[in-house]
Amino acid sequence: MHGHRFMIATRFEPTTGGILRVAGAGLGGPGKWLTGFEWADTAWKVRWTHKYASFSPPVVVAPEGKEVLVWKTQLDSMSALAHDYFLASVVSGDSLATPDTIATVFEGSFDYAAAATDSCIFAVLYDIGLQQRVKGFVRQNGRPGWRVFDLGGEGWDGLSATAIDESTCVVITGDSPRD
């Protein structure tokens, strides 16, 4: 699919009118690019592609008609520091907006989630760097930058998020005791 031998579709989004949409990373091809597809009659049509190495993007709970992606990638492979970038972007029609950097995080941080409303995006990530804490981020339309919140706790066994309104996001963390 799209120059790859395999596609791992980790995100499925049925939309209004029964249109099926998936997104995933390609393997065995030009790179681990994230690609969005839409079902068109008898085959999958490419809607958008970005050429960043991507880890599996979670489904972002968002209002009907708004499509938001969050993902983690390593943009600077020449860096002496072991870190990745936590990014967000909005899908508009058949294109993906320029990614917005939410934060720089430790490279082993794999658990993250996000939710959106009409006017903001909430994102959460378990950063296993020096502090090993769940961090929350919010960006509101018309305001520059991401606000950061230390949510505490750990998220070794997953994170989930849903927006209640423009100022409230519920975050559920999974954690098992570590001996």
Image (cartoon, helix red, strand yellow):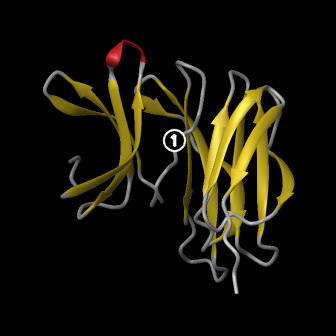
What is the three-letter code of the residue carrying label 1? Answer: Val
Q: Quadrant of the C terminus?
A: bottom right
- Which is nearer the eye, 32 or 172? 172
Q: Which residue is drawn at 70% across and 49% down?
A: 172
Residue 55, relative to residue 109: is it above or below? Answer: above
Residue 44, relative to residue 123: is it above or below? Answer: above
Using the rendered image of the protein, determine whether residue 175 is visible from the camera's viewpoint: yes
Relative to 160, is 57 on the left or the right? left
Classify residue 4 by image quadrant.
bottom left
Residue 119, position as x, y percentages in the image: 73, 24
Residue 81, relative to residue 126: is it above or below? Answer: below
Residue 104, relative to residue 94: is it above or below? Answer: below
Q: Residue at x 55, y 66 (%)?
A: 74
**Which residue is the extreme one toward the left?**
42
Report the number of discs: 1
Classify residue 128 by image quadrant.
bottom right
Q: Residue at x 18, y 58 (%)?
A: 5
Residue carrying label 1:
59
Classify residue 142 by image quadrant.
top right
**Which residue is the extreme one toward the bottom?**
179
- Callout 1: 10 Å neighbours few (<14), some, many (20+)? many
